[in-house]
Image (spheres, helix red, strand yellow):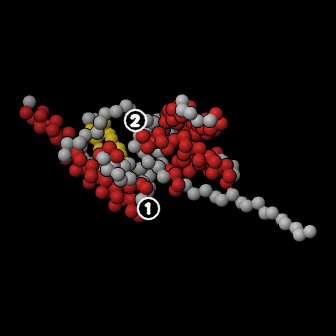
């Protein structure tokens, strides 16, 4: 009986080891196991720390991720544990949830129609890339960029699509602990129309 207790304690200690893992080639997460579940964090919001490594310059992110990992390790040592909330959102469901929430608010009809239109394309992109069942933590700025470039035919429409997909997803993502810097998505500039002026 005693050995079982020791085994349980060792298992719990092993579960509560914070580690830096990669979300993409240039983005990091802090992850650990607890209660047979894997928890992943892109920022320190859960432990009351205002730190988001993936919002820093690329060459600074690993160092900031190390700082965040140390902060989680210290919090765990001091007794902090992840709060069990509703199941983590999937990439395939977050747009639907966001649209329903925004449709219940006092936005213009045209704005709501724009978001619904963007969502229909986003849903197709998510299915095509087989992202439906992946957790929102796996969503990256690169996914958003690829969506914009694939579904917008011109620089002007790209800017509009970027604005609308940000409006659709950003708040819901951040409420689930995922912070994506949409400003990192660089778009081609729309060509300026040349105006010929003639002197009379």
Q: Which mark is residue 57?
A: 1
Q: Nearer the viewer, residue 10 or 35?
A: 35
Residue 48 x, y percent position in the rendering: 30, 47
Q: Is residue 128 visible?
A: no
In terms of secondary structure, where does tag 2 sit?
A: loop
On screen, residue 69 versus residue 151, left or right, reads: left
Disc 2 from disc 1: Cα separation: 28 Å
The N terminus, quarter of image:
top left
Residue at the far left: name it.
2
* Residue at image coords 47%, 49%: 180
| Neighbourhood count class around disc 2 (C-alpha, 10 Å): few under 14, some 14–19, many 20 upward | some
Instruction: Please name whichever residue, 82 or 28, is drawn nearer the observer in this view of the structure.
Output: 82
Q: Position of residue 83 (x, y in %)?
A: 29, 36
The disc placed on residue 21 is none
Residue 142 in the image: state x and y as whole percent.
52, 51
Q: In the rendered image of this protein, does residue 150 appear above or below residue 35?
A: below
Is disc 1 placed on a helix, strand or loop?
Answer: loop
Q: Is residue 79 visible?
A: yes
Q: Quadrant of residue 25?
A: bottom left
- Residue at point 30%, 57% (across, down): 67
Is 46 placed above or below 113 here?
below
Q: Quadrant of the C terminus?
A: bottom right
In this orientation, which residue lies closer to the viewer: 89 or 115? 115
Q: Which quadrant of the view contains residue 90? A: top left
Query: Of 48 and 108, which appears nearest the observer?
Result: 108
The residue at 12%/33% (across/down) is: 4
Which residue is depicted at the point 41% across and 40% down? 176
For mark 1, does the 10 Å Cα neighbourhood hold few (<14), some (14 to 19), or many (20 or more) residues? few
Q: Mark 1 or mark 2, which is nearer the start of the sequence?
A: 1
Residue holding disc 2: 88
């Amino acid at each position: 009986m005693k050995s079982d207790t020791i085994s349980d304690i060792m298992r719990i200690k092993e579960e509560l080891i914070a580690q830096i893992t990669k979300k993409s080639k240039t983005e990091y997460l802090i992850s650990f196991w607890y209660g047979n579940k894997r928890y992943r964090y892109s920022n320190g919001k859960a432990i009351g720390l205002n730190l988001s490594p993936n919002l820093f310059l690329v060459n600074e992110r690993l160092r900031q991720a190390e700082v965040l990992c140390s902060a989680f390790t210290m919090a765990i040592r001091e007794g902090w544990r992840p709060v069990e909330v509703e199941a983590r959102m999937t990439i395939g469901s977050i747009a639907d949830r966001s649209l329903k929430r925004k449709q219940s608010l006092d936005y213009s009809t045209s704005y709501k129609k724009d978001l619904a239109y963007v969502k229909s394309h986003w849903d197709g992109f998510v299915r095509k890339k087989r992202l439906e069942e992946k957790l929102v933590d796996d969503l990256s700025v690169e996914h958003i960029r690829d969506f914009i470039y694939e579904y917008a035919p011109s620089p002007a429409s790209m800017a509009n699509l970027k604005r609308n997909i940000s409006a659709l997803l950003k708040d819901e993502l951040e409420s689930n602990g995922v912070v994506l810097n949409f400003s990192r998505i660089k778009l081609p500039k729309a060509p300026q129309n040349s105006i010929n002026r003639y002197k009379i």
